[in-house]
Image (cartoon, rainbow, N blue to C red):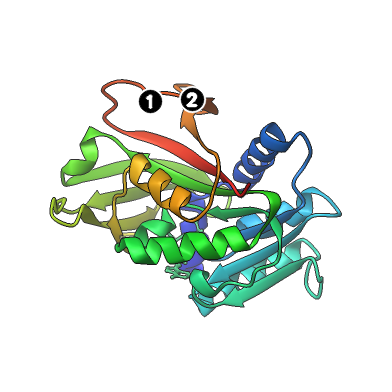
Amino acid sequence: MRRYELYEAAVQDAPSEAALLDRIYREANGRPARRLREDFCGTFWLGYEWVRRHKENRALGTDLDFDALADGFRRHASSSGLQGSTRTSLYCGDVRTSPKLATDIVFAGNFSYFVFKERSQLLEYFRNARESLAPSGLLILDHFGGADIHEASTELSRRDSDRFGRFEMSWRQSAFDEFTASSRFTLKARPRNEKRWTTLGVYDWRLWSIPEIKDALAECGFTRVSVYWQKDNGHFARREKSEANCLKWLAYIVAARN
Ligand SMILES: C[S@@+](CC[C@H](N)C(=O)[O-])C[C@H]1O[C@@H](n2cnc3c(N)ncnc32)[C@H](O)[C@@H]1O
């Protein structure tokens, strides 16, 4: 479906993300990761990209949206010769019941675990993820925050893609609810020469803080938690302290199973 392809062009960069996961794992363990479980995988572009990187790489993708999994399979599995391959597998279901396969990395991207608004749901997810990791495995979660998240806002931007050319994007956040720490986000895109915007996603998310996530991870048995913070040049590096007075920041939280 065109909507999923447009979504990928708008907010994903699977080759860069696969390289980053690989680097984070090497920095923690001194060797490459081979088995990835991508949760909330959508079209599973990252999973197919992961497997393409090395002949021993394997990936499992989990998502509730059957149409997204099917669309990704149709476009990515065939283009990378992975149709019929046993190196990728898909599970259509809730990430809290995703198969436990002793993977090197469990990854949740584009802030998808913010969908869990109750702490009990978050703990259930983190427990499943930890039980799915090999002894030196890592759970990697992306995260955003900053003073700006407490206000309603609309960000307009442009992006280029081979498939859609230059297109406009809109990322709208509704008023922040202080009682639930939640906001509703709407992602839309409009390719050049089109009058109408296409809605790519609507997300009702709890904006968890890093300490809240760290506490929940510790309660589920994760031993070490580190944070990779985005630098001015766009790259991510491990940091012990946040920068002061950030209006908006991006980071990856990395939790070690043992
Ligand atoms: C923000 S999209 C992320 C897609 C992709 N991972 C990315 O990085 O852009 C969130 C995805 O999570 C899926 N989802 C939401 N709740 C879920 C759950 N409890 N279990 C599995 N998938 C879920 C949705 O179907 C959707 O595909």
Q: Which residue is the extreme one toward the right?
A: 55
Taking depth in this image into account, of 18 and 180 the one nearest to the observer is 180
> Mark number for residue 242?
1
Please report the residue visible at 81 percent of the width from the left and 75 percent of the height from the top: 84
User: With 16 as the anchor, is 178 left or right in this view?
Assistant: left
Taking depth in this image into account, of 110 and 78 the one nearest to the observer is 110
Taking depth in this image into account, of 183 and 178 the one nearest to the observer is 178
Callout 1: CB less than 8 Å from ligand 1: no
Mark 2 burial class by Cα count in 10 Å: few <14, some 14-19, many 20+: few
Please report the residue visible at 53 percent of the width from the left and 79 percent of the height from the top: 66
> Pointer 2 and pointer 1: residues touching (CB < 8 Å)?
yes
Task: Measuring from the top left, give residue 61's x and y in whole percent.
Answer: 62, 66
| Spatial separation of the CA atoms under disc 2 and disc 1 | 7 Å
User: With 128 as the anchor, is 143 left or right in this view?
Assistant: left
Position of 147 relative to 5 (above/below): above
The residue that mark 2 highlights is 239
Amino acid type, residue under disc 1 in the picture: Ser
Position of 139 relative to 123 (above/below): above
Callout 2: helix, strand or loop? strand
Please report the residue visible at 81 percent of the width from the left and 71 percent of the height from the top: 86
